[in-house]
Image (tube, grey):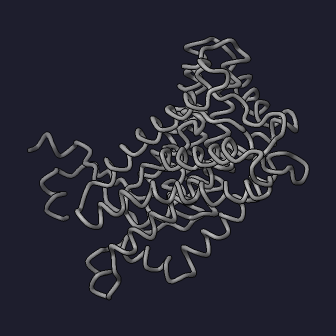
């Protein structure tokens, strides 16, 4: 045991809640550390000037007005999905089905645009797109919640499998609606008539999408923090046993919350089909349903902080793609840069939640005796 006396002894313990500014200072330092590590990797792998790469990342999002609007639009869509899955995660219902719920909303919107064009007024078709996309997404969220409430199924696997079902449904209807036949794609829906396209409001065609997501953000903030439903979600998330003890009907809360989450995911899918892309593909969601999980957790389920985390994720993705294009690097290198930065950001949460104490000069036995 004498040799152990000089060995460092590390003890990890839970940290008391940090002030919000300290938590964000730690996250900021983690981003700085990630940029430094990314610079070193850049020099070693490519020989490029790392400063030039980071300037290119910034220019990829802000060099023109169009790029800035596109950045904000992508932030809005990611934020919309993140807000949608947040109530479920705050309730400790592991909903990884945001992708499928978005696709269900996309499919419902495309069906309205294709099947109702020329049969109903345009304003009514758009109204039906709102309703049917929320209904389709809500059903896609409600089904796993119902099975969880009634038979205790695993919600993670169930919602994940629902993603695959939604993807194959979209693939099936793409073949039904493909133009021309055999093309394997739908193309731009109602390109000549623009039936079902959301109207252009404000200075950009993306502005209406951004405005709708902003309204959802405000709604979700008040819903989670100042309503009875939000309080019930928090209680269920803290302890189902406590919730049942105080008379909260947990099964009903689970189904109601997932219905809301799915409906908002479906609405976000409608914004993609009707507001920006005007088409339907199996990859239209660009894995935002999965990225939203990280956004929601990093923001600690706070809708306001989700704006910042959504910006960070989208900025990194767009910047890394711009670097790959400008310097003739393959897409894998941009993914490496993004991965390094996200690794540090996610890792910073460890230091926010826990403290690491290093004791030197005491034996492990002595240290253990004092704990």
Asked if residue 348 lies left or right of residue 155, the reply is right
Residue that sits furthest to the left in the current view? 1
- Residue at image x 48%, y 43%? 290
- Residue at image x 64%, y 28%? 320
Asked if residue 75 lies left or right of residue 190, the reply is left
- Residue at image x 56%, y 38%? 33
Q: Where residue 167 sits in the image (x, y, percent)? A: 47, 37
Q: Where residue 215 sits in the image (x, y, percent)? A: 71, 65
Q: Tell me if residue 304 comes above or below residue 170 in the rendering.
A: below
Instruction: Report which quarter residue 127 is drawn in.
Output: bottom right
Residue that sits furthest to the bottom in the current view? 246
Q: Where residue 10 sits in the image (x, y, percent)? A: 28, 49
Q: Dividing the image into 4 quarters, which one contains the N terminus?
A: top left
Q: Where residue 45 sits in the image (x, y, percent)? A: 55, 13
Q: Tell me if residue 227 comes above or below residue 182 in the rendering.
A: below
Q: Tell me if residue 54 comes above or below residue 290 in the rendering.
A: above
Q: Tell me if residue 345 comes above or below residue 49 in the rendering.
A: below
Residue that sits furthest to the right in the current view? 203
Instruction: Report which quarter residue 233 is drawn in.
Output: bottom left
- Residue at image x 60%, y 36%? 284
Figure disc tally? 0
Asked if residue 266 lies left or right of residue 56, the reply is left
Q: Of residues 81 and 371, which is closer to you in this image?
A: 81
Residue that sits furthest to the front in the current view? 119
């Amino acid at each position: 045991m004498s040799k152990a006396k000089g060995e460092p002894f590390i003890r990890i313990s839970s940290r008391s809640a940090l002030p919000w500014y300290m938590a964000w200072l730690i996250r900021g330092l983690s981003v700085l550390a990630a940029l430094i590590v990314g610079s070193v990797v850049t020099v070693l792998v490519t020989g490029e000037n790392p400063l030039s790469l980071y300037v290119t990342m910034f220019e990829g999002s802000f060099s023109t007005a169009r790029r800035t609007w596109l950045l904000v639009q992508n932030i809005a869509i990611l934020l919309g999905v993140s807000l949608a899955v947040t109530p479920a995660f705050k309730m400790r219902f592991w909903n990884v089905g945001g992708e499928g719920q978005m696709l269900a909303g996309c499919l419902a919107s495309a069906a309205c645009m294709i099947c109702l064009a020329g049969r109903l007024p345009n304003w009514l078709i758009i109204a039906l797109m709102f309703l049917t996309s929320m209904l389709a997404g809500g059903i896609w969220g409600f089904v796993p919640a119902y099975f969880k409430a009634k038979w205790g199924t695993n919600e993670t696997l169930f919602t994940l499998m629902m993603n695959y079902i939604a993807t194959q449904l979209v693939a099936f209807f793409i073949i039904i609606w493909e133009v021309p036949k055999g093309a394997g794609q739908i193309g731009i829906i109602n390109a000549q008539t623009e039936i079902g396209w959301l109207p252009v409001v404000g200075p950009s065609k993306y502005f209406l999408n951004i405005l709708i997501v902003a309204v959802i953000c405000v709604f979700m903030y008040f819903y989670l923090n100042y309503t009875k439903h939000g309080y019930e979600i928090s209680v269920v998330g803290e302890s189902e046993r406590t919730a049942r003890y105080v008379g909260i009907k947990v099964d009903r809360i689970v189904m109601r919350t997932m219905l809301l989450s799915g409906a908002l995911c479906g609405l976000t899918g409608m914004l993609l089909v009707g507001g920006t892309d005007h088409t339907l593909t199996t990859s239209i969601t660009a894995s935002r349903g999965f990225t939203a999980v990280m956004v929601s957790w990093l923001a600690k389920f706070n809708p306001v902080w989700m704006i910042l985390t959504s910006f960070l994720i989208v900025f990194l993705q767009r910047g890394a793609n711009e670097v790959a294009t400008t310097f003739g690097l393959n897409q894998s290198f941009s993914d490496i840069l993004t991965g390094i930065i996200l690794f540090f950001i996610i890792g910073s949460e460890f230091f926010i939640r826990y403290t690491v104490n290093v004791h030197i000069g005491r034996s492990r036995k002595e240290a253990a005796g004092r704990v």
